[in-house]
Amino acid sequence: MTDDMGCDRDRALRLLWQMVRIRRFEEKCVELYGAQKIRGFMHLYIGEEAVAAGVMEQLRADDAVLATYREHGQALARGVAPGAIMAEMYGKQQGCARGRGGSMHIFDAATRFYGGNAIVAGGLPVAVGLALADKLRGRRNVTACFFGEGAVAEGEFHESMNLAALWSLPVLFVCENNLYAMGTSLNISESMTDIARKADAYGVAAAAADGMDVLAVADAARRSVEAVRNGRPFLLECRTYRFRAHSMFDAELYRPKQEVAEWKKRDPILLFMQRMKETGILADADLSDAETRADREVEEAVAFAEAGSWEPVADLTRFVHSERATR
């Protein structure tokens, strides 16, 4: 059985699993932060899971992915090991960046996940460079770059869009429009709030998708990736909402509580389950099973991080410069 967007049971279970595991991972991070196991800045992805799950489904293993400091969800959906992510957040050397990056700098070359970039819009020029490298090498790879709507006010956004258009680079620009750049509403920071239309200035194709609907995101991403793989940049705006504050340090005085409550009614996991139950593809037991699996995966990730070790002081000057492999 499939629904009207071609979602059969196997695919539905995969998408549900990705969203649930991201949600459970983030919820555990809140707990660990309160216990001071995780320190520093931390930005949660709760509410935006459909974007990572929907877009990542359409990418190949040899494609590249870049994200912002709110990147735990993308890293998990990309295939970065949960234990390596958690150990990184603990600051342990078993982390994917040896504990040197922390929450905002998840990096894993094996899965072509190139950050985790703490600078707003900082990943966009890097995405252009990666796409240029792929093009010069004759590879039909896609570089997917996730960023928030606040980044469109930065010069890097416009410079990157312009170069991608000029050189016909295979970049998929994914704007996760959650309506707030830190504490600044999109309505008071942009004269034109239709982010997808900004691509018109550079002759770049664009589309907007409901970022709370994982199937809508996946469908838009499928068409976007196809265009990019054929050598044309594309801007995909996913209109979503974060259910938590900007960061763990944010008092969140800028959003009306009623607004947050209304958006929570469009929880991407619950909306997806409702649709799948109505079409007879999934049942409540499937959600329970996914939550049980996710809880087990998260606990194993925490155990891995807890058992990890701190980097020796003698190694602190390593990796300032690249190291040649020794045989």
Image: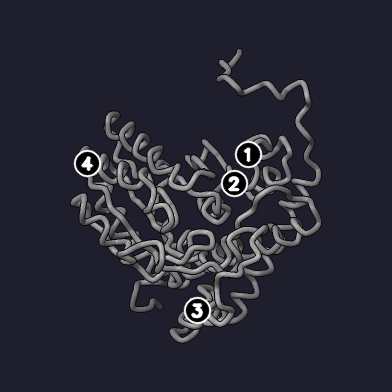
Q: Secondary structure at mark 2?
A: helix
Give the side of residue 14 with respect to residue 298, left or right: left
**Residue 273 in view, yes or no:** no
Rendering coords of residue 117 (x, y %): 51, 43
Name the mark on residue 266.
Answer: 3
Residue hosting label 1: 101
Rendering coords of residue 126 (x, y %): 41, 37
Rendering coords of residue 293 (x, y %): 67, 64
Give the mark nearest the N terminus, 4 or 3: 4
Q: Crowding near pointer 2: few (<14 within 10 Å), some, many (20+)?
A: many
Residue hosting label 2: 104
Q: Amino acid at mark 4?
A: Ser
Q: Amino acid at mark 3?
A: Arg
Residue depth check, mark 3 versus mark 2: number of the one nearer the observer: 2
Q: Residue at x 39, y 76 (%)?
A: 2
Q: Crowding near pointer 1: few (<14 within 10 Å), some, many (20+)?
A: some
Q: Amino acid at mark 1?
A: Gly
Please tell me whether residue 121 is drawn above or below residue 323 in the rendered image. below
Q: Residue at x 18, y 51 (%)?
A: 203
Cβ atoms under marks 2 and 1 closer than 8 Å: yes
Extreme residue in the top direction: 327
Cβ atoms under marks 1 and 4 closer than 8 Å: no
Q: Secondary structure at mark 3?
A: loop
Residue hosting label 4: 168
Q: Amino acid at mark 2?
A: Met
Cβ atoms under marks 3 and 1 closer than 8 Å: no
Give the mark nearest the N terminus, 3 or 1: 1
Label 3 and label 2: CA atoms lie apart by 27 Å
Give the mark nearest the N terminus, 3 or 2: 2
